[in-house]
Image: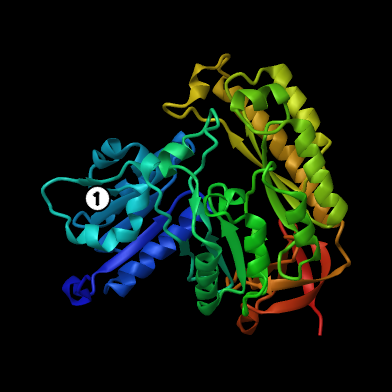
Amino acid sequence: MIDASSFDHKSAAFHTLGCKLNFSETSEMSRRMVNAGYEKVDFDSIADVYVINTCSVTEEANRKCRQIIHRCTKRNPNAKIVVTGCYAQLEAEKVAAIPGVSLVLGSNQKNDIVEHIEKITNDKPQIVTGEIMHDKTFNPSFSSGDRTRSFLKIQDGCDYFCSYCTIPFARGTSRSGSIESTINEAKCAAEHGAKEIILTGVNIGDFGRRNDENFLQLIEALEAINGVERYRISSIEPNLLTDEIIKHVAQSNKFMPHFHVPLQSGSDAVLKLMRRRYDSSFFAKKINTIKEYIPDAFIGIDVIVGVNGETEELFKESYDFIKTIPFSQLHVFTYSERPNTQALKIKPVIPLQERHNRNAMLHELSEEHRIAFYKKYLGNISTILVESSEKEGKMAGFTPNYLKVEIPYDPALTNTIQSVKLNMLTLDHQAIQATLIG
């Protein structure tokens, strides 16, 4: 047990790079440090400790981490800088060599952050990592601080080893808590004021596989929690998105008609190179099943462009396939070479400029679909969960099917569900202007 008084009310600031899962874990670390006596301050403030939770999906994510560390050292040269997350796990020695870094924590050492900070000395950077591939520990977490929503970590790690991806090396093999323990975490999130919970993890459809439980059983159990008005399912692999899960969302009053499904490529040849576990026809059938049972569902799709082996002809094949899918928005990623992945052995290597060109093509297609999806609901009545932030006299919220809606700012409406009429798109086409009803 750490004596809170020993920290003399030192301040700590936190920054998160990457996915929703990282936000969940950063929030857990901040709660532990506050409970140990630290004062949480804004990341742009002068703090005694800076905690940076990193991503390593692309080289750009690594570069951003290094930039942030440099900014922290300029802001307070005497601060303790703690770097954790995927970049820290994968390249601990390289991270420790960055000037100013005091402590490098591996992926499964986050929960013991207070104890590790207490042991920091001024001699040299300390590295505390573990053999993540052999670690079966699951550390639950949920984000708090935004009263409206919470990212609830239900699963960690991945057993898939796609050829382009380092996530299994950064987070280990798939593991999760029990339904009972996950329900308890969700109740804690609700007690912190969250009206909406987003289920997150590395491969959430794999939930419970080693416990003789499954994802469908989990979402059925979550329905009964008081205080949570809405749930959303974050990215779920198409081969794990069963028809039973889709049907449950279709009849549920709490699970929103919103799906995020990674495709990665519409070319079967590229999918095979990626070591994905489905082909394009399977994916199309899954998306069409969603639309069959939930016609108004928002469907976001992940795509990676420019992977090794994606020739011009194969990209065109992918592009043409994606055009046939009834998606609402694409999340387009430019391929970035990751160390120790099998994709590095694949030829041809696509020039960087060509990767960016393909990204731009799919972004343009995505905007066409997203704006068309938004326009489809103009004039309709819907509901939004109102968020607290204010911008130019407006505040925003999302409809069940993930339309971003703006209404006049009124702080009394924060974290409430309001009925609205969807009037018109904003000038930048990023949201719908609406009026309150009743």
Return the x and y of residue 171 as percentages of the image width and height: 43, 44
Question: What is the tally of numbered marks visible in this picture?
Answer: 1
Q: Position of residue 365 (x, y in %)?
A: 76, 38
Q: Quick check: 65 left or right of 369? A: left
Where is residue 246? Give x, y as percent: 76, 54
> What's under tag 1, amino acid-wise?
Leu
> Most extreme residue toward the left, as rendered?
123
- Locate residue 30: give its quadrant: bottom left
Question: Residue, x 21% and y 54% (percent of image)?
Answer: 77
Quarter of the picture holding the N terminus: bottom left
Q: Is residue 278 above or below residue 390?
A: above
Q: Residue furthest front?
A: 212
Give the structural element (helix, strand or loop) at label 1: strand
Q: Quadrant of residue 40?
A: bottom left
Q: Which residue is mark 1?
A: 103
| In the image, residue 392 above or below residue 128 | below
In the picture, measured across the screen, residue 427 lies left or right of residue 1, that is right
From the top left corner, tell me how far across and down residue 327 is, in percent: 78, 45
Residue drawn at (85%, 61%) of the image: 377
Residue 43 seen anywhere in this rendered image of the structure: no
Quarter holding the C terminus is: bottom right
Residue 379 visible: yes
User: Nearest the camera: 112 or 213?
Assistant: 213
Q: Is 139 placed left or right of 220 in the picture?
A: left
How crowded is the residue under tag 1: few (<14 C-alpha within 10 Å), some, or many (20+)? many
